[in-house]
Image: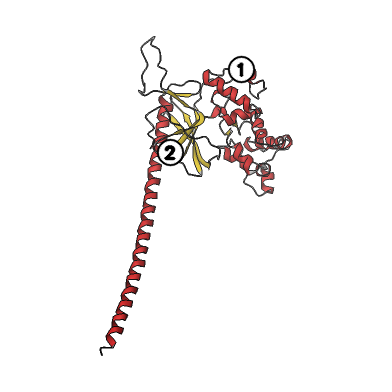
Amino acid sequence: MNAARPAQRGFILVATLWTLAGLTLLAGYINELVASDRERAELTRQTMQDDLNAHGTTATVMYLLATSRMNHLGLILEREQRLVGLEEGAPWPSGEGVLEVTGRAYMGVGRVQFSIQDETAFASVNKPDPMLVAAFKHVGLADRDIDRLMPRIVDYIDPDQEMMLDGAELYDYQRRDLAPPANWFMTSPLQLKKVLGVDDLLTPQQWRALRRVVSARLTHNYNVNTMSPAALAVLLGGDESAVRRVLATRAERPVTNVRAVVAKTGRDVPLPEDTLMLPSRIYRLALWRPGDGARSLVGITLTPSSTFGPWRKEYSYSEPIDDDAAPAIRAATPLFQST
């Protein structure tokens, strides 16, 4: 009877140890589960906050576009927004800085970053002209491939079924089991990939470079003052020193005509003689967050004389963020509160 007690005590000790080990494992599991739930909750909270900040950034940009004075580079920022005119003869204040509409990256609300691009700075996929040819050459397409592609673009957007020489109409798309041509203007640059043969001619790297320098907007002229560095590279045949000279020139004064570009760079450019000097009414707003692999783009048209609102959204889509994108800078306005 007494000899059994040590064995009984040993059994109780082992059982206690096993129970403690089990409780330790259970506590660790619960702790890990709680930590995981907290992490998911924090991620959800951050995502919701980022979405709110993106809406806040968009609203602020739209407010500035609709109310700000402009110079040749963009919006003149003033800490005290002026919504009424000054007295007759009074000079306009110069403001605290410029929010460029050249695709420059800025810090928005919270972690959100953004850029604004005047779309008269880009070649249009709906306007097969020398600038669009230059864009294709810039990304590395051979002349013979461009010659094949241009009539197909025309056939894709024109409203008839008459095929141009080397073009493609409904029958050609049906033979390849592809969606028929729109026979209307493309709504975004992404639609260019639906033109017969584009996927065969453009590599992913070429497409990535092309989408940075084209638009679907139809314009009557181009604006050298609001061209991004990538768009200027298209205009100037990839001459980086010429791009830097134009950037330095327009930082001091507006570029008023093509002759000034030729004189400054010594290069012929695929533009008509007259160019736009001030930003237009059509813009591309891009929004993204650090660490995201993609950014969202929204096409905006300012409509100050409309009875429905001061602006209109034309399109929206997402695209990958460029690996060589420049870092965002702070805008000279307290309206964007970065944290």
Q: Amino acid at mark 1?
A: Ala
Q: Amino acid at mark 2?
A: Val
For numbered disc 1, what is the local secondary structure? helix
Residue 3 position (above or below residue 73): below
Indicate which disc residue 260 carries. Answer: 1
At which x and y percent is residue 86?
A: 36, 14
Q: Where is residue 64, by image quadrant?
A: top left
Q: Where is residue 258, by image quadrant?
A: top right
Q: Where is residue 222, by image quadrant?
A: top right
Indicate which disc residue 112 carries. Answer: 2
Residue 317 position (above or below residue 3): above
Circle 2 Cα neighbour tier, 10 Å, few/some/many (<14 / 14–19 / ≥20): many
Instruction: Say which residue appears at 36% left-offset and 54% top-offset.
Output: 38
For numbered disc 2, what is the local secondary structure? loop
At which x and y percent is residue 108?
A: 42, 35
At which x and y percent is residue 39?
A: 38, 53
Q: Is residue 39 left or right of residue 325?
A: left
Residue in front for this viewpoint, 93 or 128 = 93
Residue 90 position (above or below residue 228): above
Instruction: Say which residue appears at 66% left-offset and 50% top-offset.
Output: 177
Residue in front for this viewpoint, 227 or 36 = 36
Can you name the residue that lies furthest to the top here? 89
Instruction: Tell me, yes or no, if residue 315 can be seen here.
Output: yes
Circle 1 Cα neighbour tier, 10 Å, few/some/many (<14 / 14–19 / ≥20): some
Q: Is residue 130 left or right of residue 249?
A: right
Q: How many marks?
A: 2
